[in-house]
Structures are given as structure tokens and as C-alpha cells.
Amino acid sequence: MLKNTSILGSLDKRLFIIRAFQNAPGCLLKFAALCCAILIGQGAAPAAVAGPESEDQIVGRYLSATHEQQTALRGATMEVDIDANVPKLKKNGKLHALRNISKVGTVTYHMLGFNGDNSVKKEVIARYMTAEVQSQSGPDISITPQNYKFKFKGVQNHDGRSVYVLALSPRKKEVGLFKGELWLDRDTCMPVRESGRFVKSPSLFLSKMEFVRNYDLQNGVSIPQSMRSVTKTRLFGPVELSVNFTNFSRDSESNTVAVASTEEDR
């Protein structure tokens, strides 16, 4: 796993660059969209102590909390800064956009500005946004008992908050599923962090994909805060993506904003 550093201009899925990626399926960004964490931080190992609740109770509360979270985020808008970097090619780019979640849960983007290399914009950032939008209609890869085995690892302090640490092991080797950890706020069982490595590459061009996604608790609900990911490519070395979410708001009058298309990004 990668070491923690403070970067985040980039949680999500799925990283890919320049022309080689045009031969790879769109699902390769599905990962990042789910995700998907530049420099995964491990932190101190959680203490192996028994929690006041059983493992099944914790998972049950988490499933109820995530359902509540999804409902609470509908109709929300937030600003997003997406940074992409390809060190070997010395190329990078940064896009600023509005991310909207409609009343029915559809995610859309509206680009506000971009600085950097256009190839990074089209082959990495635009693919990330498109993959997140498309992932909503793809196979279910949510963190549920149907897709994962949960194992309680202990209780840990995270930013002054007591959290449950659960190990996640996918029940099958499928694109979009990962092996890693899920951290839950002890009081609400809302997610505060997800991290790991995807168990199946969506393309021969990609050899390893790791991520970390962080959430901020606001009024008892987990709000996306950041996503960082590093993807090892066979042709261009590592591709780094960092996503920061700010200025979260809910507007009962708004619907959705137009998704930034590849043509618009040019």
C-alpha cells in the first residue's frame, strides 16, 4: 500500500493515459470513480480489542447508515478539483467543476475551468468523470455482504473520532471490487474512510490500482471529502489522480447540471 501524504485534488473510481487507454474499456476508470487514492495511508495498526457490538451488528448498522447517506446526498451540489499527474511523461492537469447528485441519485458534472496538458484532461480526467457517471448503471459493486466478507479488526482513533476498523475481502474476483479496509464512525456507523487495492484489472495496460477515499461527517451524514488513487500502467508508469470535494450544499429547487462531455473538454 502507498504511504499517506497530503494531496487530494483529484476518493474517486477507475487511470489511464494517452492513446494506450483508447484500447482499454471504459471500465478502467470505473475503479477510480468508485473510487476510487493517491498515496494510501495506513496509519497506526488498530488495537485488536473487542467492540461493544458484534461484527454482524456493526455491519447491519453500516448498511442502514449508507442507505440514509445516499438519501441525504440526493439533490446535493459540491465543487470538485480533480488533479491528474503522469510523472514519467511530465504531464499534468487540474480541472475545477460542479458535481451534482440529482433527486434520483444521478451524478453529473459541469466543467468550470481547466489548466494543464490537454491529453491528461481527455485521457484521464474526462475518463474519470465519464466512468463515474456510467458506473451507476453497471454491475452492483457496493460494499455489502453480497460482495464482501467483513472482519472486525478493532477500534482506532481517527482525527479525534473513535472508529471501527473492518477488513474487506471480496467474495469474487470482479472488476470494481477491492481488498482493503472500511473505517466507520463508532457512533453513527457512517463511513469515514475506504481504502485498498482492486482485485482485478480492467485492462492489460494496467497492472495495479490502489486508492483511498475519505469522508467528512456533517450533521450525522458522511460527505465526500477526498479521493486519491495511483494506477500502475505498463507503458507510462504510475498515473496519479487526486480529487477534492468542497462547498457541499443542497438546493431543493435544482435538478441536474449538464455532464461535461469529451467534446466540451477539448
Image: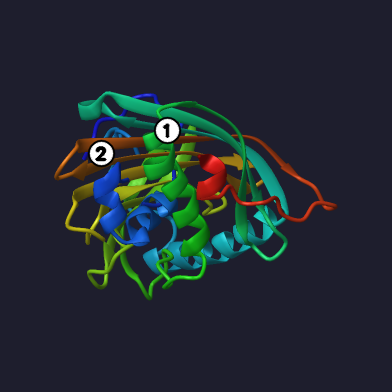
Q: Looking at the image, which residue is at 36% across and 52% down? A: 14
Number of residues whose C-alpha sits closer than 10 Å to that of mark 1, classed few (under 14), some (14–19) or many (20 or more):
some
Residue 104 in sight in this render? yes
Q: Nearer the viewer, residue 163 or 206?
A: 206
Kindly identify the amino acid type of the residue bearing the numbered disc 1.
Asn
Residue 48 visible? The answer is no
Q: In which quarter of the image is residue 175?
A: bottom left
> Going 57% across and 52% down the picture, which residue do you hit?
188
What residue is shown with label 1? 118
Where is residue 239 drawn, in percent x and y? 28, 37
Rendered position, 140 above or below 232: below
Protein image colouring: rainbow
Q: Which residue, given by chain and number where applicable, does mark 2 sit on?
A: 45
Q: Residue 1 in the image: x percent, y percent?
A: 21, 40
Secondary structure found at label 1: helix
Number of the label disc, if any, that sits on residue 208: none
Residue 145 sits in quarter: bottom left
Q: In this view, does 134 lie above or below 140?
A: above
Q: Nearer the viewer, residue 135 or 67?
A: 135
Can you tell which of label 2 and label 1 is closer to the viewer? 1
Q: In this view, does 11 lie above or below 5?
A: below
Callout 2: SS: loop
Q: How many labels does the image show?
A: 2
